[in-house]
Image (cartoon, rainbow, N blue to C red):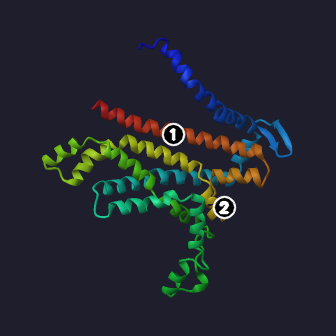
């Protein structure tokens, strides 16, 4: 059957989705943008104040520290974390002995809620009864100097990072799915030509993973810009501002300071950073793909 007025049908089918987007996302974003320019608390209606909230937050050293920490975590998540997932996928693709057990075990941390993971590591690394104390004792160290990894500004940032950076099972599954979609005839032809396993990965598998790698980098970056629960459950952004990121700063502005205008100004910056990262990553990987297509 020939379909007439195809453009009209497209509009009719997409209209419910666009309406849902407008209600669920667009309207709240517009509200956040407007109230970020207002004096706004629990006990007062929004009153337009111009750029006052933005001047306030950019004059706050804690806010600048939260941006630095957020961007550093984004970098670590989108490079080391995603690359680790790719390496694990390359290993598991060969299906070594026990690969199914390893794959399942590697996915378990991704199944556990991140808030629960934060509580688990807080207990595990507790200086009074966690695994650090018996280890310290076996090393013959002074028991009065057992380090509080979450409570010391020298260690807190990297300790919090350790709670998620190694668990890249989600990325591994995505890469394995992409590798499974590659035409096996390409691999067979490479083997017939005498290519070694590392050469197959270097010249066939890795080049074909660039697009999905860009997708994983995008997902990892966006997730880290909005990371909240595991940081809040372990350090609450402390000690000082050593693990403070944008979501924690926003939460404190809204709850502890009762300043929704300031909190929404932070939200606007957070949205802007997220959009900028997505556009930069897309441009980077689209440019690489375009250069390769032109060769």
* Residue 155 visible to the viewer: no
- Left or right of 90? Residue 263 is right
Is there CB contact under 8 Å for labels 1 and 2? no
Q: Quadrant of residue 128?
A: bottom right
State the residue lying farthest toward the front: 1
The N terminus appears in which quarter of the rendering? top left
131 or 18, which lies in front? 18
Q: Secondary structure at mark 1?
A: helix
Q: Which mark is residue 236?
A: 2
Residue 264 place in picture, x, y as percent: 71, 43
Q: CA distance from mark 1 to mark 2?
A: 27 Å
Residue 28 image offset from top left, x and y in percent? 69, 36
The x and y percentages for residue 21 are: 61, 32
Instruction: Decide: is 272 above or below 113.
Output: above
Which residue occupies the extreme right position in the image? 43
Question: Looking at the rendered structure, which numbered label has been put on residue 278?
Answer: 1
The residue at 54%/23% (across/down) is 13
Say what secondary structure mark 2 lies in: loop
Seen at 46% across and 37% down, the residue is 282
- The image quadrant of residue 87 is bottom left
């Amino acid at each position: 059957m020939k379909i007439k007025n195809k453009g009209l049908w497209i509009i009719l089918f997409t209209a419910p989705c666009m309406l849902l987007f407008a209600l669920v996302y667009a309207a709240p974003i517009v509200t956040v943008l407007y109230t970020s320019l207002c004096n706004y608390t629990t006990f007062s209606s929004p009153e337009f104040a111009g750029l006052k909230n933005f001047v306030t937050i950019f004059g706050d050293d804690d806010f600048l520290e939260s941006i630095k920490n957020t961007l550093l975590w984004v970098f670590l998540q989108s490079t080391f974390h995603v690359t680790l997932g790719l390496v694990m996928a390359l290993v598991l693709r060969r299906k070594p002995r026990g690969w199914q057990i390893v794959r399942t075990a590697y996915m378990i941390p991704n199944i556990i809620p991140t808030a629960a993971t934060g509580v688990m590591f807080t207990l595990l690394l507790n200086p009074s009864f966690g695994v650090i104390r018996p280890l310290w004792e076996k090393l013959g160290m002074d028991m009065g100097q057992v380090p509080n990894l979450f409570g010391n500004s020298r260690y807190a940032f990297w300790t919090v990072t350790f709670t998620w950076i190694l668990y890249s099972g989600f990325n591994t599954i995505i890469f394995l799915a992409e590798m499974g979609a590659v035409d096996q005839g390409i691999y067979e032809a490479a083997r017939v030509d005498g290519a070694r396993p590392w050469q197959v990965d270097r010249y066939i598998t890795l080049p074909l993973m660039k697009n999905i790698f860009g997708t994983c980098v995008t997902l990892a970056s966006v997730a880290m810009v909005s990371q909240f629960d595991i940081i809040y459950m372990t350090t609450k952004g402390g000690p000082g501002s050593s693990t403070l990121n944008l979501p924690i700063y926003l939460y404190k502005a809204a709850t502890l300071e009762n300043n929704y205008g300031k909190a929404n100004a932070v939200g606007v910056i957070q949205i802007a950073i997220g959009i900028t990262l997505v556009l930069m990553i897309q441009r980077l990987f689209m440019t690489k793909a375009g250069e390769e297509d032109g060769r």
